[in-house]
Image (tube, coloured by chain):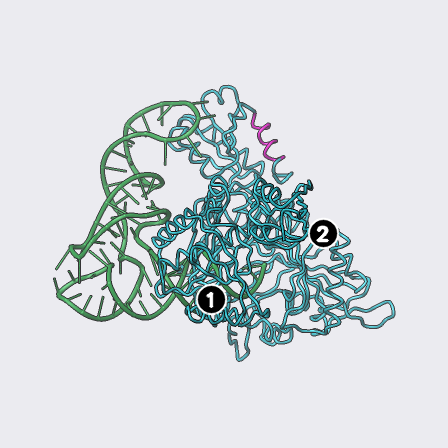
Chain colours: A cyan, B green
Amino acid sequence: MLNGGVEIKIKYPDGREASGPLPDIEGKLKKASAIAVRINGDLRDLSEVKHLGNEASLEPVTFESGEGREIYRHSTSHVMAHAVKDLFPNVKLAIGPSTEEGFYYDFDLDRPLTPEDLERIEKKMAEIIKENRPFNRKTLQRKEAIELFRKAGEDYKVELLKEIADDSVSLYEEGGFVDLCRGPHVPSTGTIGAFKLLSIAGAYWRGDERNKMLQRIYGTAFDREKDLKEYLSFLEEVKKRDHRRLGKELDLFSMSDDIGPGLILWHPNGATIRRAIEDFWRDEHAKADYKILFSPHIAKLNLWQKSGHWDFYRENMYSPMEIEGLEYELKPMNCPFHIQIYKSNLRSYRDLPIRYAELGTVYRYERSGVLHGLLRVRGFTQDDAHIFCREDQIEDEILSVLDFTLFILKTFGFSEYDVYLSTRPEKYVGTLESWERSTEALKRALEVKGLSYSVDPGEGVFYGPKIDIKVKDSLKRAWQCSTIQVDFNNPERFDVSYRGPDGKEHRPIMIHRALMGSLERFFGILIEHYAGLFPVWLSPVQAAILTIAERHSEYASKVTQMFKAAGVRTEVNLDNEKIGHKIREATIRKIPYLVIIGDKEITEAALSVRKQNGENLGSMTVEDLLGLIKEDITLRR
RNA sequence: GCCGGGGUAGCUCAGUGGUAGAGCAGCUGAUUCGUAAUCAGCAGGUCGAGGGUUCGAUGCCCUUCCCCGGCUCCA
């Protein structure tokens, strides 16, 4: 068939359209810097356009689009595998997909990779890219493919092929390197502009810990050097904000080998911030009609058997301890305690909803390899609450919890979220019907609030479905904090009831919720979110008073006392040091307000004020500055 | 838990089969100074812990604890 006569329509991402014969269209695709193309809606290699025999509509796919980036990076992972295969002929290839930020490829190698290997691989990749070999697609029978890879000793590919349902499969070849792949790919290796290999890590074949541990190389690729540089400096920024590093620098918290992994020591600075958060939390909960509780850290094993934790949550619980012949457990959750408090009295339908809240410290066993600073620990304090309500109150309660959550999060500068609805997991308690009902209740509430969400199938807790809210921090990274869980099961297990208007006993519903999640994790997130530069209301030290010379000490001490009396967390630096030194020190400690006192201030009965960021507020009175700081505190900024 | 890397002064890090060094911080003294580091001196380490090899180990080997990057799992 003569391609020249076929009319082809092209549609640009911005909505513009054009049409024409094939050669024209190929030119247009090139001009649009397409790396692949959608033909009648399907993602294809650019080279497929040549073979179009019929009318078709095309859409250029560029690096700018999500799928374009995926193709681009996936192709880069092929080039990396090619390079590794060249350098390590004995390598067995596993899989090499693109990820949100880049790509990886898993290899089975007979020796561990080193950072020097990464450099060699990068060099090799650069050569392959320079050669600009075309990516060629081949299809063949699955059986043939299995034979081909078997001969090549590519056991992992054979395993993958055996599980593919289709009879025919596609392979991609570039510069003699062949890989099983669905495609599409960029037209040729030379398309790849800027790439970088980032790290080496272990990864189980198919993510299953019973399988062999492979070596994974992570990398990323961009079509412009500038964007790669930008991404790398983003990684630098992430490193700078690392809460473990800032935690040490700002003396916020630590962990001790002598105490044990995953157990946090809150230093005075960290504890001050925590207290500010807790005070805020308590005040707001009181306003929102929550009753605040305290409960013990251990309880009889029996309780946990009754609650189902022992059956469904044991792998996260510590071994029981024996006390006078009875076994006790460190608590992994607070709910059974709150239930006991509810049950300590007869409840009427008029009492509901009853909202119990507790900053409850729980202990969960986490495998040693997963611990991570404050973000993953073994002992942590949840900002937990349990709402006991009638079934007809569920939706309203969930709605008000959602509002409350968003309000709390917003106070910390989180205003973007990803919302997930997690449904019934494999291990669960309760009836299918109650799962159905509670899932529906959560869904309805999300819809009423107009929050867009995605469903996380099977990710619910064993006793009920949940809504999880992930906040986006100032670097747009998503962190799991809030969780709202409906529970029809625990009230059943503990025979929780209330007296209805009919004089009979009814079963309330429980809603478990945590807004910040855990104080430890939330604190870790906040440190990174603020890059250690806490807003004034949270800052461990809100004002530093710095003197020019020793003769200013007396006045400075007096001012300090006034600040402290006004409730401002203040430190005074009377050291025999130059003012530049004191400013530098206070700035590094990220103290928001720096107050300078010298001869001039004393004669004028004033203060010179400088902010952490170097901004000079000039001269003002003690009252003026206290006013400013107190306004920051009240407005939580 | 698994794979890989690592643990040296309070912190950041250098170093070697012959029992350790820098910068910052600390202390002392001099200096009394105006918006991100004044100068000098001093002190500071069972080189993560235990065992082994060796005439001799911080270094080599084994075990163990902890940390880091991931996998898996999760607040």
Single out the mark in the foreground, 1 or 2. 1
Answer with left or right where residue B39 lies relative to residue A371. Answer: left
Spatial CA span between label 1 and label 2: 36 Å
- Circle 1 SS class: strand
Q: Are marks 1 and 2 in contact (CB under 8 Å)?
A: no
- Label 1 crowd (10 A; few <14 / some 14-19 / many >=20): some
Residue at the limit of the structure toward the right, as seen here? A502
Given residues A205 and A52, the one toward you in this image is A52
Q: Which residue is mark 1?
A: A204
Given residues A279 and A88, the one toward you in this image is A88
What is the x, y in percent for residue A188?
Answer: 49, 50
Q: Tell me the magenta residue range.
A: A621-631
Q: Earlier in the sequence, mark 1 or mark 2?
A: 1
Any mark on residue A54, and which?
none
- Circle 2 SS class: loop
Query: What amino acid is found at the position of numbered circle 2 in the picture?
Result: Leu
- Label 2 crowd (10 A; few <14 / some 14-19 / many >=20): some
What is the x, y in percent for residue A324?
Answer: 52, 78
Q: Are marks 1 and 2 on the same chain?
A: yes
A329, above or below A103, in the image: below
**In the picture, which quadrant includes the C terminus of chain A?**
top right
Magenta span includes A630? yes
A523, above or below A611, in the image: below
A599, above or below A55, in the image: above
What is the x, y in percent for residue A130?
Answer: 41, 46
Magenta span includes A111? no
Given residues A434 and A602, the one toward you in this image is A434
Q: Residue at x 58, y 53 (%)?
A: A48
- The answer to whether any part of residue A524 appears in the image is no
What is the x, y in percent for residue A151?
Answer: 42, 71
- The answer to whether any part of residue A598 appears in the image is yes
Q: Which residue is mark 2?
A: A451
